[in-house]
Structures are given as C-alpha cells and as structure tokens.
Image: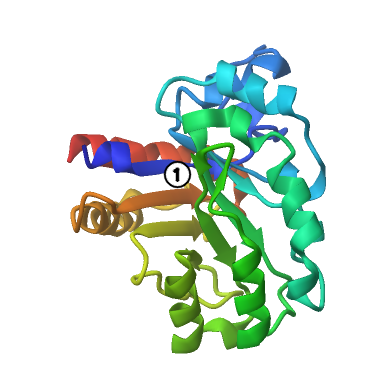
C-alpha cells in the first residue's frame, strides 16, 4: 500500500541524452513515453507550461501508460507569470478545460509555478488560490504551488495553503527556498542536486534518507501521498536517480 502512495519519476520524457543512457538503442521516439512509464511511476509534464495541448493528446498519454502511472502537470505559465495573480481566472479556466480530464485516474497534482522574482503578498496569493477549481468534469483536482522566492517561507503562506487545501513544492535546491508541506497530506518533492559524476545522480546513500522520509510520510495516514521528481541538476542522470529510489523503495 505504501509504495502505491509514493510516486517517483522525472520531468518530461523527451531528452536527447536519455537516448544514450536510459532508452534502449534504436527505440523509436514515439515509444519513449511507453517505455519510460514502465520504468518509473510518475512524470511531471513540463510541456504544458509552455504550450497548450488538446484532449486527444491527454487521451493518448493515458492510453500509452500502464495502470497506476500518474502524470503531474505544470500549469501554463500564462496563468502564473503575472504581477497580479487575482487576474489569472481566465487563464486557469482555459488550462483546466483544455482536456486534462482525459487522463482520468492518471491525473496527478497540478503545479502552479511562480516566477522566481514573485514575492509573497498574502492577499495576492489568497486571491489566486480562490480561483483554483476543486474538480473538472467530476475528477478531483489537487493543487501545488511552486513558490521560488524566499519571502514565501512564512507561516502565513502555509496557513493560506491549508485554508485552501493546497500544498507547496519542497526542493533541495540551493537556489530556491525549501518550504515544508506538513500541513497538507500531499508531499511534493523536486530533487534538483543530481551530479553528473555519479551514475545514479545521487549516490545511493544520499537517496536512502529521501526514501525513508517518503515511507514515514505516507505511513502517517491513509490520505498521505508523496510525489518525488528528480529534475534539473544533471538531468541526464535523472532517470537513474529515480530508478535507484524505486529500487530502494521496493527492497525495503
């Protein structure tokens, strides 16, 4: 049960260096999602941050991946890259209505990434959170804010998230604030310190504490769930890092 509540993966599935060290030689590009989804248990889709996709695309992703696989989607930057977040309603509605519901049970959290220069203003963030829908065509939605400015590391921010049933990204990056998520039953980790010199990105002994933390978190309650993405850093090592995490998760 605990393993089913811990989802582990990478950002995207189309990356040239992965064709040398993750995908089998000669694998058609059209089969990369099919392959990746059988080696990992989740993928954070970055393409939705830059482009608008249509329902048939989401349906195709759903059909190419196995049961239990989950997609996390980064919301289009048009929704968050703005000075006044209270004006994001139209963009949010457009993104949510673009066909996400085609993923069905494979739809994981939606990540709303703010600009690194976007400072915390309680009224502004509160107004944005009020705009986020709870469901789309009967499918429950879970929302994660990726707040990158250090001013977000406050109790007031965590209070707002708890009030609106949302959570925040936790990262080990030294570029962005590491903000706890303990007031939500959803933990969302973006691990960004992979090392190109290490075959698994993170040395196995560095992965172990994250595995243990994820197990402890999901063991706190039936509703507790955890998403772990190896992303950025030495991106060419990300799949190996995720596979090492899954290996340790399985062996324990």
| Left or right of 136 on screen, residue 14 | right
- Above or below, comparing residue 104 to residue 220 in the picture: above
Which quarter of the rendered picture does the N terminus lie within? Answer: top left
Seen at 54% across and 26% down, the residue is 36
- Above or below, comparing residue 98 to residue 114 in the picture: above
Badge 1 marks a residue whose secondary structure is helix
Q: Which residue is at the front of the view, 27 or 37?
A: 37
Q: Which residue is at the front of the view, 25 or 160?
A: 160
| Left or right of 82 on screen, residue 39 | left
- Above or below, comparing residue 86 to residue 59 in the picture: below
Residue 241: image location, x then y, percent: 45, 44
Q: Report whether residue 233 is seen.
A: no
Place residue 58 in its image quadrant: top right
Q: Report whether residue 133 is seen.
A: yes
Seen at 74% across and 65% down, the residue is 80
- Above or below, comparing residue 126 to residue 43 in the picture: below
Q: Which residue is mark 1?
A: 241
Which quarter of the rendered picture does the C terminus lie within? Answer: top left
| Left or right of 30 on screen, residue 207 | left
Place residue 16 in its image quadrant: top right
Seen at 75% across and 62% down, the residue is 89
Seen at 49% across and 49% down, the residue is 229
Residue 139: image location, x then y, percent: 51, 39
Residue occupying the far front of the picture:
138
Neighbours of disc 1 within 10 Å: few (<14), some (14-19), many (20+): many
Q: Which residue is at the front of the view, 35 or 79?
A: 79
Residue 201: image location, x then y, percent: 48, 49
Q: Which residue is at the front of the view, 174 or 187?
A: 187
């Amino acid at each position: 049960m605990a393993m089913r509540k811990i989802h582990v993966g990478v950002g995207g599935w189309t990356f040239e260096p992965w064709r040398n060290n993750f995908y089998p030689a000669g694998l058609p590009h059209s089969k990369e999602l099919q392959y990746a989804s059988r080696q990992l248990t989740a993928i954070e889709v970055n393409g939705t941050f830059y482009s608008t996709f249509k329902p048939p695309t989401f349906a195709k992703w759903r059909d190419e991946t196995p049961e239990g696989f989950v997609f996390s989607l980064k919301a289009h930057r048009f929704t968050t890259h703005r000075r006044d977040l209270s004006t994001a309603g139209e963009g949010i509605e457009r993104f949510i209505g673009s066909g996400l519901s085609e993923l069905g049970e494979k739809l994981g959290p939606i990540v709303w990434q703010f600009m690194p220069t976007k400072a915390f203003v309680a009224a502004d963030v509160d107004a944005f959170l009020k705009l986020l829908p709870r469901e789309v065509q009967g499918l429950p939605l879970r929302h994660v804010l990726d707040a990158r400015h250090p001013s977000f590391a406050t109790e007031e921010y965590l209070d707002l998230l708890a009030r609106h049933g949302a959570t925040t990204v936790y990262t080990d990056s030294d570029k962005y604030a590491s903000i706890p998520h303990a007031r939500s039953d959803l933990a969302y980790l973006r691990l960004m310190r992979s090392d190109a010199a290490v075959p698994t990105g993170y040395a196995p002994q560095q992965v172990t504490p994250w595995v243990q933390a994820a197990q402890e978190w999901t063991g706190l309650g039936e509703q507790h769930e955890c998403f772990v993405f190896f992303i950025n850093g030495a991106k060419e090592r990300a799949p190996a890092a995720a596979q090492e995490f899954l290996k340790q998760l399985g062996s324990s």
